[in-house]
């Protein structure tokens, strides 16, 4: 197994700032916007962006949640081992709000489809956008594209994109791993 560094910590930080600025351009004061991190890995990106928006860009009205999509996935009954659900923390109103779904990697689009279904359990947003750190091209199963993307990566099927966050792997980095 070999791996290639796609993004180091400095590059991840630059991309996070760019994504935060793009969100500010489109959502101004965030009074009508909810950021929703898709569990498990989108939570780290959502938390990091929320912290950055509050601390460095002085956004006061930021609403943040975390959404577990485990039982909304179209493949959850196909696994041999029992699935482990993550905590859903959507303690904010999404009805008639602009929702930004946040995930680390957009691959086939199936997780996003599940998130679109899951968020409906909490109300009907006026608009839903998608933010991803990594957009893997050439591997979509569904016609889903991000509104905000950190970096687009051309990876073939035997390659995997691995995103590391300092909060759980001890470093901010993105690798392209060949098996």
Image (cartoon, grey):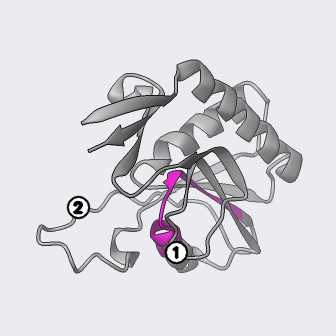
The disc label shown at residue 84, or none: 2
Q: Left or right of 25: which side holds 101?
A: left
- Residue 152 is left or right of residue 176, and the answer is right
In this rendering, the answer to whether 105 lies above or below 128 is above
SS category of the residue bearing label 1? helix
Please identify the residue farthest to the top as the structure is shown: 10
Residue 34 percent coordinates (x, y): 68, 57
Q: Is 43 positioned to the left or the right of 77 in the image? A: right
The part of the chain drawn in magenta is: 99-115
Disc number placed over residue 48 in the picture, else none: none
Residue 10, quarter of the rendered image: top right
Q: Is residue 97 above or below residue 165?
A: below
Which residue appears at 49% of the width and 74% of the height? 141
Q: What is the quadrant of residue 145 in the picture?
A: bottom right
Is the C-beta separation of discs 1 and 2 under 8 Å? no
**38 falls in the magenta region:** no
Provide the secondary structure element on which disc 2 rests.
loop
Residue at point 70%, 74% (across, down) = 125
Q: Identify the mark nearer the N-term, 1 or 2.
A: 2
- Quadrant in which residue 163 is drawn: top left
Horizontal and vertical percent position of residue 138 = 54, 62
Give coordinates of residue 129: x percent, y percent.
Answer: 70, 63
83 w.r.t. 152: above or below: below
| Figure disc tally | 2
What number is the disc on residue 113?
1
């Amino acid at each position: 197994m070999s791996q290639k560094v796609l993004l180091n910590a400095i590059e991840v930080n630059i991309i996070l700032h760019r994504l935060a600025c793009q969100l500010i351009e489109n959502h101004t004061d965030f009074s009508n916007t909810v950021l929703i991190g898709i569990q498990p890995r989108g939570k780290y990106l959502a938390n990091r962006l929320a912290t950055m928006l509050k601390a460095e860009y002085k956004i006061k009205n930021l609403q943040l949640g975390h959404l577990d999509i485990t039982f909304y996935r179209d493949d959850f009954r196909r696994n041999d081992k029992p699935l482990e659900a993550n905590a859903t923390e959507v303690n904010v109103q999404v009805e008639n709000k602009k929702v930004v779904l946040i995930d680390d990697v957009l691959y086939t689009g199936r997780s996003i489809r599940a998130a679109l279904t899951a968020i409906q359990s909490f109300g009907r947003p006026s608009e839903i956008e998608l933010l991803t750190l990594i957009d893997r091209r050439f591997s979509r199963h569904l016609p889903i594209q991000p509104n905000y993307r950190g970096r687009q990566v051309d990876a073939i099927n035997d390659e995997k994109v691995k995103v590391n966050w300092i909060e759980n792997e001890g470093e901010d980095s993105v690798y392209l791993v060949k098996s």
